[in-house]
Structure formats: C-alpha cells, structure tokens
Image: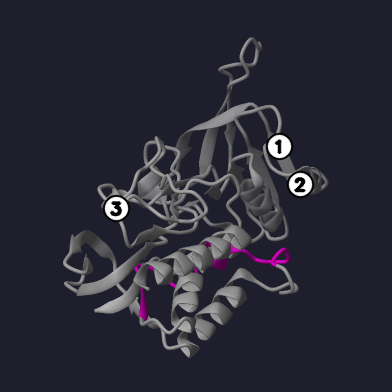
Amino acid sequence: MHDVIVIGGGPAGLTAALYAARAGRTAMVLEKNAYGGQITWSPRVDNFPAAGSLSGLEFADRLVEQVMGFGVELELDEAVSVAVCDGGFEIRTAFGGEFKCRALIAATGAEPRRLGLDREEELTGSGVSYCAVCDGEFYKEAAVAVVGGGNTALQEALYLSDICKQVYLIHRRDEFRGDDMLAEAVLGRENVTPVMSSRVVSLEGGSVLEAIEVEAVSSGSEESGQRTRLAVSGLFVAIGHVPDNEIFAGLMALDESGYADADESCTTKTPGFFVAGDCRVKNVRQLTTAVADGANAAVEACRYLR
C-alpha cells in the first residue's frame, strides 16, 4: 500500500511524485510508454523559469533523476483499471500488476489527434508522424508537410525547415491560431510554404507515403473544392490532442471533449483522487502549467492523507 500512486510519467506526474516524496510520503509513478511525456519531443525549452535553454529530453532526464533521488518508485506498465477499495484505490495493469494506494493522482496527458484519413494508421511510421522531433531526421533534405495552425504546428514547421528541403504548412483557416512571433518566424523561412484554407483529403503511396492530396475549403471562393497534389515523403500531424481519461470516467467528471473537469485545486468528485496536467480542463497547456498542476495535486493529496 503506497501513500500516493501517480498514473502518468510526464512533467505533471513526475512533479506530483516529487512533491509527495519530499513530504515524506511513499510514492510510485506508473508510466505506459517513456518517462518525460510530450516535452521530450521538444527540441528546445527556453521558457521555463531559471532553467536557461535546454532540450525537452534533457529537461525530462533531469526531472527523472531528481525524482529517483527522493526514492520515488518508477514502474513501466499501463494502468487498465482503477477501482475504489477499502482505504484507497486499486490499480490493475496490462502486465498483470496490482497496486494499491491511499491517494491517487491521474496525470495521463493527451494523445495526438488523428486526421481520420484512409490509410492513416497503415502509414503511421512510414511517412505519417505526430512528432517532428522524433522523426524529422528521417526526412533530411526531403519535402514534407505539417498540418495545423497552432503553436505546435508552427514549432514543428520551424524545426523541420532546418532539416528538410521543403515544408508545406497546411491549415484549415486563413490565418494561424498560434503566437504572432512564431507565425512571423515561420513566414520568414524561404523553404516554408503556407497552404491556407485547405485540408488534407487523401494519402498516396505504396508501403510508404509518396504524396498527399489537399483540398481548398474557403467558403464562397471559386477555389473551394479545388484539389492539389503535393509530393511529400513525410506528413506531420499537429492538430491537437485527445485526453487519456477513459479508465477514470466513473471517478471524475469529464467535459464534452473528455478532459477532467477540475479546477486548479486538482480535486475530483472522488475523495482521495486528484488530476494534473494536460488531461485536465485548462486554458493554457504548457510545461509551466503542467508542473504547477503536479505540485497542486500532490499538496492536496498530502492534505487529504493527513
């Protein structure tokens, strides 16, 4: 029986475990993939106070080392069910593990949103990607496309422009949703071509992606419905994320998009159960807000245990 178990090993989850351990509580983090979460995809982090400039992977490695130094247990396994039991919670995992705790923190983050195209899953890893930092090097000096108009899409386009010969940036609207500074930086790159008011409608190729078909979607325009074929080797999808909260549906309120409907106290309707990070309803999803959630959730969990 642990005092606190955290499901999810991104910045929010690791920070929660760190705060719990420093408060003298036994803590464990369950992570199904790799510790660090989405921040490990970021080529550079320079907006975390006092941290200077470092890669997302460096940041994650430092945080994991710090957490382990305080005696937090790390377990690579996927939680498949959570149930309230006497005195706390019971978590069952994909590898047959059973863990119990008195307080539980969900910090499961969110999964990349798919385009929903035919052959998208088939070509994932063979031309279709959801992480430019992870896969960009495979497309050195090639032509690629990025789909999206927010900060993530703009950042991925900038990153790829340093690696690839040509980057098409495809967005459904006629202007970007991301920060003006990022948009200006993207538009200043000679090898980045914005493809506005357009959407990807099909993927072409055999065992690997060879081209995409793009359709104009401007309402009331003569170009609406017009299709263009772009020869690209890689398609990077950056259109948002879907929260991974399904196994907690009976324990906390969810909004219409599946995010945990909890305020900054990170408490839920179930006593002893807390939520932190990108899986929670919030206006800003950044590294700073993730670690803030982790701290809040852990403080509330320790208060609950007292």
The structure residue drawn at horizontal position 37% and vertical position 67%, both measured from the top left corner, is 304
Q: Is residue 199 magenta?
A: no
Of the image marks 3 and 1, the number of the one nearer the N terminus: 1
Which quadrant of the rendered structure holds the C terminus?
bottom left
Residue 77 left/right relative to 143? left
Q: Is residue 45 magenta?
A: yes
- Helix, strand or loop under label 3: helix
**Does the rendering let one see residue 138?**
no
Q: What separation in Å lies between label 1 and label 2 (alpha carbons)? A: 9 Å
Quickly name the residue at label 1: 194
Q: What separation in Å lies between label 2 and label 3 (alpha carbons)? A: 39 Å
Residues at badges 2 and 3 in contact (C-beta under 8 Å)? no
The structure residue drawn at horizontal position 29% and vertical position 66%, both measured from the top left corner, is 78
Select label 1 or label 2 by which is in front.
2
Quickly name the residue at label 2: 186
Q: Amino acid at mark 2?
A: Val
